[in-house]
Image (cartoon, grey):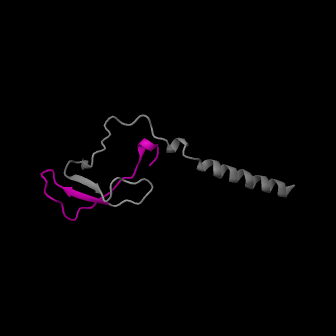
């Protein structure tokens, strides 16, 4: 009897683990239909304080999905002067995908 409950417990844990992984249809993987109105998909952005402009360029186009990417970043002042030895921080959040 004890062996039965142990086997049942293992099967329930396995089912929960598989169910938790879900497929592509899980809510966390779906695109939000309420994208922010100010979403900017351009390749040049100003820093939060407006002190710098950053332009990013992919090494290959079109950009491939599910592949490693290589990007070139160009950092300059608002006047266009290049910035040397810049320290870059990237936030990889994806709020439109309901995660990150």
User: 88 or 41: which is nearer to us?
Assistant: 41
Residue drawn 27% across and 54% down? 56
| Outermost front residue | 62
- Residue 76, located in which quarter of the rendered image? bottom left
Left or right: where 22 falls relative to 58: right
Residue 91 covered by magenta stretch: yes
Residue drawn 46% across and 40% down? 31
Give the number of callouts. Answer: 0
> From the image, which quarter does the N terminus lie in?
bottom right
Q: Position of residue 52 (x, y in %)?
A: 20, 52
| Prevailing secondary structure class for the magenta stretch in the rendered image | loop
Q: Position of residue 71 (x, y in %)?
A: 31, 59
Residue drawn 36% across and 36% down? 36
Q: Position of residue 5 (x, y in %)?
A: 81, 53
Residue drawn 12% across and 51% down? 79
Magenta part of the chain: 71-100
| Outermost right residue | 1
Residue 5 covered by magenta stretch: no
């Amino acid at each position: 009897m004890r062996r039965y409950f142990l086997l049942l417990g293992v099967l329930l844990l396995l089912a929960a683990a598989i169910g938790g992984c879900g497929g592509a249809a899980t809510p966390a993987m779906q695109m939000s239909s309420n994208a922010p109105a100010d979403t900017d998909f351009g390749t040049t952005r100003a820093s939060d304080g407006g002190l710098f402009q950053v332009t990013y360029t992919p090494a290959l186009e079109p950009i491939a999905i599910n592949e490693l990417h290589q990007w070139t970043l160009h950092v300059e002042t608002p006047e266009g002067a290049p910035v040397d030895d810049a320290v870059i921080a990237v936030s990889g959040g994806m709020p439109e995908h309901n995660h990150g």
